[in-house]
Image (spheres, coloured by chain):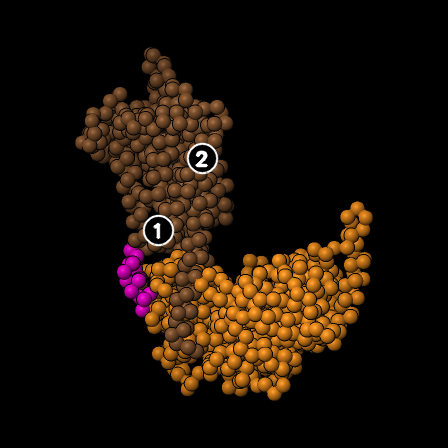
Chain colours: A orange, B brown
Amino acid sequence: MSAAIELTGITKRFPGVVANDDVNLTVEQGEIHAICGENGAGKSTLMKILYGMQGADEGTMKINGEVVDFTSPTDAIDCGIGMVHQHFMLADQLTVLENVILGAEPTLTGGRLDFKKAETHLREVADEYGLTVDVHQMIETLEVGERQRVEIIKVLYRGAEILILDEPTAVLVPQEVEALFENMRELKASGTTILFIDHKLDEVLKISDSITVLRHGKTVASLKNEGVTAHELAELMVGSELPTPATTSSTVTDEVALRLSGVTVLNEANRPVASNINLAIRKGEIVGIAGVEGNGQGDLVDAIIGTTQISSGTIELLGNDITYESVRKRREAGVAYVPEDRQHEGLLLSSPLWENAALGHQTQAPFGSNWWLNRDGARRQTEAIRQQFDVRTPNIDVAAHALSGGNQQKLIIGRELTSNPDVLIAAHPTRGIDVGAQAAVWDDIRAARRNGLATLLISADLDELIGLSDTIVVILRGEFVATLSPDEVTPRDLGAYMTGAALQNGGVA
Amino acid sequence: MRTYALSLAAPVGAFVLTVIVSTLALLAFGSNPVEAYGDMLSHASKLETQVDILNRATPFYLSAVAAAIGFRMNLFNIGVEGQYLVAFLFAAQIGGLISLPQVLHILVIMLVAMAVGSLYAGLAGILKTARGVNEVISTIMLNSIAVGGLLAWLQQEWQAEQGEAFTSTTLGTNPIDESGLFPTINGLLEIFTRDIGQGKQLTGMLLIAILVGVLYNLLLNRTRFGFDLRASGINPFAARAGGIPPKRMVLAAMMLSGAVAGLIGVVELADRGKFPPDPIQGLGFQGIAVALLGRNNPGGMAFAALLFAFLDVSSGVLDSTGAASREIAVIMQGVVLLTAVVAYGVANRLRERDEASEAAEALLAEREVVPA
């Protein structure tokens, strides 16, 4: 039997970058095949080519032994390929059934929708692959893991036999990952071929039959998952020793830099999204907040930065009450901020780098004063940030959008740390950046910690959280439910706390 | 090098397209394009016509700067129209009631106009910051309130005392003393040229418009406020996280825009000497077009204001020569605006792509030097 997917010599060039350089990939029928590599290694481009979203410049694609040439995803779907994107494409206000049939609706005469037929077919598909869903539930009421299952069903409903999953575990907590893997095994048992992208190596080793590693757009290895270790895989991905987030000896002092007392934040509907939060971060200390996204950590960050007003409680910076101060006053007083979404809240994408470096510090030397913007000072400082934080750019006059994600992040980290802050609020500081940049960011935060910076770290990367933090607090539905020591906790335990499972069972052993 | 070529290509491309389209339009109406363009250019080559063009470009430019201040922070002040009309009326009425030494008189009138324009625009700012009303809606409505309500009512209230002879020339507010009229600057131009004939007067507000352009440039690029303004326009969320107070910026930008709009009233007042029953309308909307064409750039808007004024004024001659209908100017203004927006859009995209590949190349080059 011929291979399900056979890609030979795939090359794709973008202006100035070769995203895929002579990539070869063979996926056998009915196997789970993992593709791993750093961000920017060319995984997504390869998947886009395979799914017909982009055309390759060179190379041939064979699906089930036949040479194909996709010009759109429709061609790929016709060939039995289905893709589940990292960001779900579901309509919140529609039911599971409506979402699944959207775009492939069976109709009766006169164009009326044949819901009965649709539901029957959906149930057949769900039963065949052992995927359980309530077809009449509204998407907005579903958990992330369930939404993902709906996405998978949607693809199978359209007759997909080859499934592409783009970083499926990125949005899931460990328990949901287990459920996903269980589903994947059932799919495999029913004869589906699965191609999945991931860079969490333990997951790759756990679920896949074969692994292809990409680095800098090239295939560096294609191997069976037999006797391979995570360490070997990591070295293949990075091409060198893998950096770890672990901090060295404690630098925690006795002086409290940031203190939150009884802080409660209400949303527009007057519901508490963070209730009665008490937190003290000392100089030289990193406090990590673990929590499933949307449990109030974002609102807490906004409250500390000052973009959200708190309804009760106080916030103190070095003993000074800043509860009612403006964002600008807080920043001038020494609060630095690395936002969760750098493009949304951190950068002026169409502005030159030196203006981006000035943002948030434009009222202070060397960037400016209350009245004037100091262009020369700002440029000098940006040049210094570029060198010290290794921002790879042709010059400081290019617009921020021209930089890669990792370099954008290094610029932001540099901008926030060179202002010598007392407190750093770092929300997902290494999200979506490659391993090299990630290591640089960790180093920067560790160096600042040694110099007495008090850091609040929010991260979905539990290894990062455990590795960097001096203390970890778990937030669940707007409340701190546990304080843990990173020395004694595993990502699995943390996951249990984050979902509340550990609390119901009376804690983890 | 390529970057410069690109920034030149856009206006040149827009110009060529405009000429092609208007030539086709002229041909379609059975006019001779060569004759029509020839008449317009020869008319514009006269000194007196040039004075007219400058007089027309002055309010266009002020109006464009007023609109651009808002545009730079994604705030669409469509209300320049209403703001300058209300400012014109108040400045005329107050200027007509007082008599002061010249410099002081003019200064008071200018301050009144700017304050009134600023406050009227501020209403839209307050509506937006306090109640979240979109400024496009509120300024459009404030325009209607200004023209249909305030002006209609106050024009009657403030109608100058009628003497024995009630004629159309006595309608309007009390005429302002000579001391309150911004002086004309024929002398300044005549240093370089022959004497200006036909009783044409070059408005002194031209100098104020140039000053406003210089200050606008300084404000945007050199001041902290200007940086805050631009940052808020490019990414309001990043601006807020960077400590820029969003509401205060909306109000400040709106009021600043209105203050500049108020100066248009001073230009008109200097020309008419009072608030007439038939004040010129539509300058606010022309300003939006000029700002768009000039890309909110002080120099670009000056060029655009001159171009629009040239088309307006020089097309006037077509009626008398009969080479074409003067409405061809309106077509050309519309077409140049459309083509410019498209051409700049394309040039921008090309430049962004260039920048991205340049940055990527820098990264690749570095990788080759230091192999991982």
What segment is highlighted magenta in the picture? A367-384
Q: Is residue A95 magenta?
A: no
Return the x and y of residue A111 as percentages of the image width and height.
77, 48
Q: Secondary structure at mark 1?
A: helix
Q: Quadrant of the N terminus of chain B?
A: bottom left
Of all residues, the one furthest to the top in this rendering is: B164
- Residue on which the image places disc 2: B20
Q: Residues within 10 Å of mark 2 (few under 14, many from 20)?
A: few
Q: Quadrant of the C terminus of chain B?
A: bottom left
- Comparing marks 1 and 2, which lies closer to the viewer? 2
Q: Is residue A375 magenta?
A: yes
Return the x and y of residue A281 as percentages of the image width and height.
43, 76
The chain under label 1 reads B
Q: Quadrant of residue A395?
A: bottom left
Residue at the location (54% across, 67% down)?
Answer: A11
Q: Quadrant of residue B152?
A: top left
Circle 2: residue type: Ile
**On the picture, is A272 further left or further right than B308?**
right
Taking depth in this image into account, of A499 and A192 the one nearest to the observer is A192
The chain under label 2 reads B
Circle 1: residue type: Tyr
Query: In the image, which disc is placed on residue B4?
Result: 1
